[in-house]
Image (cartoon, rainbow, N blue to C red):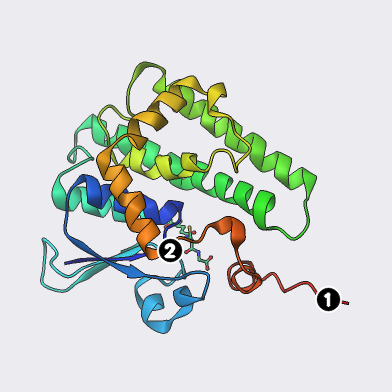
């Protein structure tokens, strides 16, 4: 059985996109990061960085001990290798084309768009320099993806883990201060992926776990996630 430790955020959605597209059976284990579940000792044993998603495979292909994996990019790669889907095999040049875009997302688009969300939505003060920095950097990265998609339907040829990693971060484009009309190839790609039934199912699964949006985060959640203390009332 595949147990996915999950909360419906962009990094969580990446993995349900894979599981739904591959039609694999899995169990969702909610990790409510707004309540501090990510700091529970049992969870830290499989995800020492106190972040979700994390995956436990109780029936690995090799050996009999369960395998646990944290970091969404590593989880996507694990699932691709386990199933032989959405990532070409070892030695195939297409594998490295796919992986370079996966790591581009992990090291670039994800962290930059994450900081964009933070300074635009959650930071207790609106710091113009930080907001501009991350909105501009997000726009630059959207531009890179747009250019890449000029002559192909998906980031690395066929629909792959590289697309699954980037798509959830484009979903929140408005909150990131981006207009998809400025990125026509990216917009077509976005609509192509949004139209997939597996993608609809993945996002529905997310809603069944939590319908809350990050826009209405409580003060307690801000404290847990960002160490932001409740503003003192006079
Ligand atoms: N690089 C990690 C990032 C994971 C991550 O940042 N997860 C967030 C939610 S999107 C989280 O669990 N946050 C909990 C916390 O900050 O305490 C990955 O891609 O898996």
The answer to whether residue 103 is left or right of residue 65 is right
Q: CA distance from mark 1 to mark 2?
A: 30 Å
- 130 up-or-down from 144: above or below: below
Q: Position of residue 12 (x, y in %)?
A: 39, 56
Q: Is the residue marked by circle 1 packed among few (<14), some (14-19), or many (20+) residues within 10 Å? A: few
| Helix, strand or loop at mark 2 | loop
Q: Position of residue 15 (x, y in %)?
A: 32, 53
Residue found at the far bottom of this picture: 41
Q: Is the residue marked by circle 2 packed among few (<14), some (14-19), or many (20+) residues within 10 Å? A: few
| Helix, strand or loop at mark 1 | loop
Image quarter of the N terminus: bottom left
Residue at 45% in and 71% down = 32
Q: Quadrant of residue 6?
A: bottom left
Q: Position of residue 91 (x, y in %)?
A: 19, 36
- 185 up-or-down from 211: above or below: above
Query: Which badge, 1 or 2, comes first in the chain's sequence?
Result: 2
| Residue, disc 2 | 210
Front residue of 212 and 16? 212
The answer to whether residue 152 is left or right of residue 38 is left
Look at the numbered discs 1 and 2 and tell me whether their residues touch, using CB distance below 8 Å: no
Residue 135 in view: yes
Image quarter of the C terminus: bottom right
Residue at 30% in and 56% down = 75
Q: Which mark is residue 233?
A: 1
- 218 up-or-down from 107: above or below: below
Q: Quadrant of residue 128?
A: top right
Residue found at the far right of this picture: 234
The answer to whether residue 174 is left or right of residue 124 is left
Label 1 CB-ligand 1 distance < 8 A: no
Residue found at the far top of this picture: 151
């Amino acid at each position: 059985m595949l147990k996915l430790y999950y909360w419906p955020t962009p990094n969580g959605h990446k993995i349900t996109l894979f599981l739904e597209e591959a039609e694999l059976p899995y169990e969702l284990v909610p990790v409510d990061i707004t309540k501090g579940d990510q700091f529970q000792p049992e969870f830290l044993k499989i995800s020492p960085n106190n972040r979700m998603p994390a995956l436990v495979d109780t029936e690995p292909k090799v050996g009999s001990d369960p395998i646990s994996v944290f970091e969404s990019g590593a989880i996507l790669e694990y699932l691709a290798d386990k199933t032989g889907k959405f990532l070409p095999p070892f030695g195939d040049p297409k594998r490295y084309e796919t992986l370079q875009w996966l790591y581009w997302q992990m090291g670039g688009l994800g962290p930059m768009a994450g900081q964009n969300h933070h300074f635009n939505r959650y930071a207790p003060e609106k710091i113009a320099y930080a907001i501009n920095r991350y909105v501009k950097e997000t726009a630059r990265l959207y531009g890179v993806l747009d250019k890449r998609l000029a002559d192909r339907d998906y980031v690395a040829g066929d629909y792959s883990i590289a697309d699954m990693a980037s798509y959830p971060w484009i979903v929140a484009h408005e909150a990131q201060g981006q207009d998809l009309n400025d990125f026509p190839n990216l917009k077509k790609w976005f609509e192509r992926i949004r139209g997939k039934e597996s993608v609809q199912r993945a996002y529905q699964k997310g809603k069944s776990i939590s319908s809350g949006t990050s826009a209405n985060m409580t003060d307690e959640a801000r404290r847990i996630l960002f160490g932001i203390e409740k503003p003192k009332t006079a």
